[in-house]
Amino acid sequence: MTKRNQRLLGVAALLIGVGVAATLGFTAFRKNMMYFYTPSDLAAGTVPVGAAAQLGGLVEAGSLVRGDGLKVEFRVADCAKNIPVRYEGVLPDLFREGQGVVADGYMNDEQVFVATRILAKHDENYMPPQVADALKGNPDTGKHSCMPFKAVDKTVAAS
Amino acid sequence: MIPELGHFALILALGIAFLQTVAPLLGYQRRDAKLLAFASSAAQAQFLCIALAYVCLTISFITTDFSVAYVAQNAHTDLPMVYRVSAVWGAHEGSLLLWMLMLSGWTFAVSVFNRRIPAELSALVIAVLGVISTGLLLFMLLTSNPFDRLFPVPLQGRDLNPLLQDFGLAIHPPTLYMGYVGFSVAFAFAVAALITGKLDAAWARWTRPWTTTAWMFLTLGITLGSWWAYNELGWGGWWFWDPVENASFMPWLAGTALIHSLAVTEKRGLLKSWTVLLAILTFSLSLLGTFLVRSGVLVSVHAFASDPARGLFILIFMAVVTGSALTLYAWRAPKLATVGELHLFSREGLLLLNNVFLVVACAAILVGTLYPLVIDALNLGKISVGPPYFNAVFLPLMVPLFVLVGFGAVVPWKKGKSVETWQRLKLPALFAVAFAIVVPLALHGRAALLAVTGGLLGAWTIVAASQDVWRRIRAKPSFVAGIASVPRATWGMTLAHAGLGVWALGVAFVISYGFEKDVRLAPNASTEIGDFRFGFVGATEAKGPNFIARQGEVTIERGDHSVTTLYPQKRFYPSQRNVMTESAVDATLLRDLYVSLGEGFEDGSWSLRIYVKPMIRLIWLGGVLMFLGGCLAASDRRYRLAKAAERRLAVDGGAQAA
C-alpha cells in the first residue's frame, strides 16, 4: 500500500468513526430528551400518552394520599390546572404539600402522570426555576406569586 | 477591621495583576530584561495579597463576625470549627476567592520553578496568567465581594448549607479548583508559544509537568465529589450526569487528551498546533464549568449565584479570554509547522486516536449539557437530557479507548510491527478473556454482558498497561535493578492506566450486580436483598452539635451470621430549618451495604433505601490510582534534569544568535 492510500484509509476510518459516534449520539439524544411541561400543558392533552416528560408545579395542599407500602398519589398544580401524579418510592426530604416539585415520568391513558423520579430542592424557600417561570402567569406583576395558585387551591378544596 | 484589610488586599492585588500583565508584554515588545524580570516579583506579590485576603476571610469565619454579609449567610455560632474553615468556600463569593488563591498560587509556582526556563517565555506565561487574574479580581470586586458589610449586624448567622457539612466536601472544592485553575498554566504556555512562535520539544517538556499536576488534582477532585455525592445525597449513586458534574468532567476529558498529545509533541515534535488548541480548549472548558456552576443557569446543589449580572460578567470574560486566544491561534498557528511523518500504527498514531475518542466524548457531553440551556435561552421550550443519553454515548466511546491503552503500552514510537505487538499482547489478551469469564461467574454466579465487557476491558487495561514496566524489569539482570531502572514517569503512566482498568471493573460490576430497593418497613420487620437480610429495629432520637436527628437501626445478616448494624440518620438542622439524609454504609472492597432513611410514618414504620453495591469502592480506588500515577509522572527526574540542561542550551543558543 502506498503512503497516499494509507493516509486515505486513515482519514476514511476517522470519518466513519466520527459518523458512527454522531449517529449514536443523535439517536440517543432524541430518545432521551425530555420536555418540561406545566400541568396546564398536560391537561390540554398535547403530550402523547407514554412519551417521556417532565412535569413541574406545586404540590397541591391536601392532595397527598398514601397507599400500600411506598405508593403515593398527589396532585401537581399551576395557576390554572392540576394533574394527578402517581409514584412509588421514597419521596425526597423537601417534598411538601404547597412546595415546588419536578417529576420525571409519562402520562398514562387514564390521564394520570406516572412519575419515575421526583425532585424537590434542598431549600424551603427555593422553587425550581422552571416552576417559578411556569407560575409567572400574571404579566401585570411580573414576579411569581402563589396568589392565583391559592385560588385554585380553594376551588379544589371546595369541590 | 480585618475584613477591611482583606478588601484592601484584594484591591491591591488587582493593581498588581494589571501590572503583572502589562509590564512583561511591554518588556517583550521592547526586549527589556528589567520589565520581563518584573513578572516574577509581581506574581509573588499578588499571591501574598490574595493569601492575606483569604486569611482575613477565614479569621472572620472563625470568629463568626456576622457584620460581614458573607459570613452571616454561611456560618452559625454552633458550627463546628472544621466546617467554619471550610465554610469559607461554601458559597459563591468565598469559592471565587479560593479560585483566585489557587490561580495566584499556580502563578507563584510558575515564578519560582520557572527560573530555569527562558526568561522571555516565563514572563509571557506570567503575563497571560495576569490577564486571567485581572478579570477575576474585577469580577469579585464589582459583583461578588466577600467582605461586604451587613448592617444592622444580625445576632445569628444563617449557617452553612448542611449538605456541605461533610469532610468529603471540605476537600472536594479545593482539589477540584486546583485542577480547574491549573489548566490555566497550560493555557498560558500555549498562548506564550503562539506569541513567540516557538514551539519545540523543550516547550512541551516544560508544559507537561504543569499539565499533569493540574490533571491529577482534577481527577482527585472529581473522585472526591463522586464519593461525597454517594455519601451525602442519600441516593446511593456515584455519578448522575448532572450538568455540574459534566462541567468538571469535560475539562477532565480535554485535559486527558492534552497530556497525551503533549507526549507526542515532546517525543516526536508532531501535533503541535493540535496540542496548543487543546490547551486553549481545556482551559476554556474550565471557565465554562465555572460559568455554568456560578451563573445560576443550572439547577443544582452547586448553583449559588442567581444574580444575572454575575452570569453575564463570567460569560463576557469567557468570551474575551477564549475568543482572543482562538483569534491568536488562527493567526499564529500556521507558524507552528510540523516536521516528520505520522504512521497510524505507532505510539503517536494510537495517541492521536486516543485524542479523537476523548474529544468526541467531550463534545457529546458538551452537546447534552448545553443544548437544553440554548433551547431555553432561545425560548424554544424547556427540555432536559437524561442520564441514558450520556450513558448511551459515553460508554461505547470508552470501549476503543480501553483497547488502545493496551496497545499504547507496547507499540513503539515511529512505527509498530504487528508480529511483535501480537507477541507481547497475546498473554494479556488471554488473561483478560479468562478473567472476564471466570470472575463474574465466581463472584455472582451469572455472567451479565456488561460485567463481562467491563471485566475484559478492565483486566486487559491493567495487564497490558503493565507490559511496559514488566519489559523494562526483564531487560535488567536482576529484579531489584530492574525495578530501580524504571523511570518514575513510566510507573506513573502504568499506575494511571491500571487505575482506569480498576475504575472500569468497578463501574461494570456495580451496574451489573447492584441491588437497589426502596421499601417501607415497620419496626422489627425485615427484607431480603441478594444474600442479605436487612432488619429494621426501629428509629430513635439522636443529637449532634448543631442538629437533631432520628436515627434508624438496621441489622444486616447473611445466612445465619450477623454482618453489621447500620445507623442511618435523618437530620434536622434548626438554623436553616433544613432536613438532611445521612446514609450509613458498611464498605469492603468487594461490596458496599448502603442504607438511608426516607420518611417516618405515623405507625412507626419508615421508608428506607437499601442498596447492595458490589465493587463500588473500585470506582474511587481507580480515581485515586490515577491521581497517584499523576504524582509520579509529574515528579519524574528528567523534568528537573532537563530543565538544567536546557537552560545551558538556551544560554548557548542565545549567545550564538547574538
Image (cartoon, grey):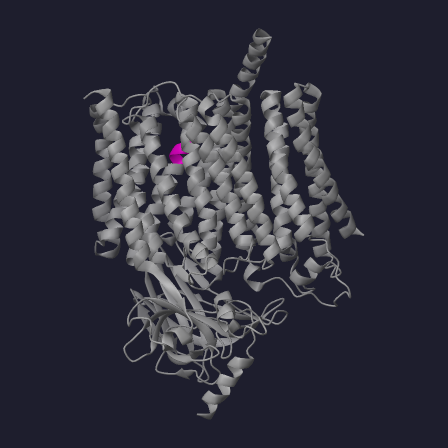
Q: Quadrant of residue B544?
A: bottom right
Farthest-out residue, right? B1
Left or right: B108 with respect to B419? right
In the rendering, at what x and y percent does residue B488 appear?
Answer: 45, 28
Magenta: predominant secondary structure element?
Answer: helix
In the rendering, at what x and y percent does residue A59 appear?
Answer: 46, 78
Question: Which residue is drawn at the image coordinates 64% and 22% (left, top)?
Answer: B29
Q: Is residue B129 above or below residue A138?
A: above
In the rendering, at what x and y percent does residue B72 appear?
Answer: 70, 62
Of residues B481 and B240, which is closer to you in this image?
Answer: B240
In the rendering, at what x and y percent does residue A145 appear?
Answer: 56, 75
Q: Is residue B424 above or below residue B357?
A: above
Q: Is residue A55 above or below residue B89?
A: below
- Quarter of the rendering occupied by the C terminus of chain B: top right
Magenta segment range?
Answer: B491-495
Q: Is residue A4 above or below residue B452?
A: above
Q: Is any atom of residue A50 visible in this view?
A: yes
Left or right: B24 with respect to B594? right
B287 drawn magenta: no
Question: Which residue is drawn at the image coordinates 44% and 33% (left, top)?
Answer: B259
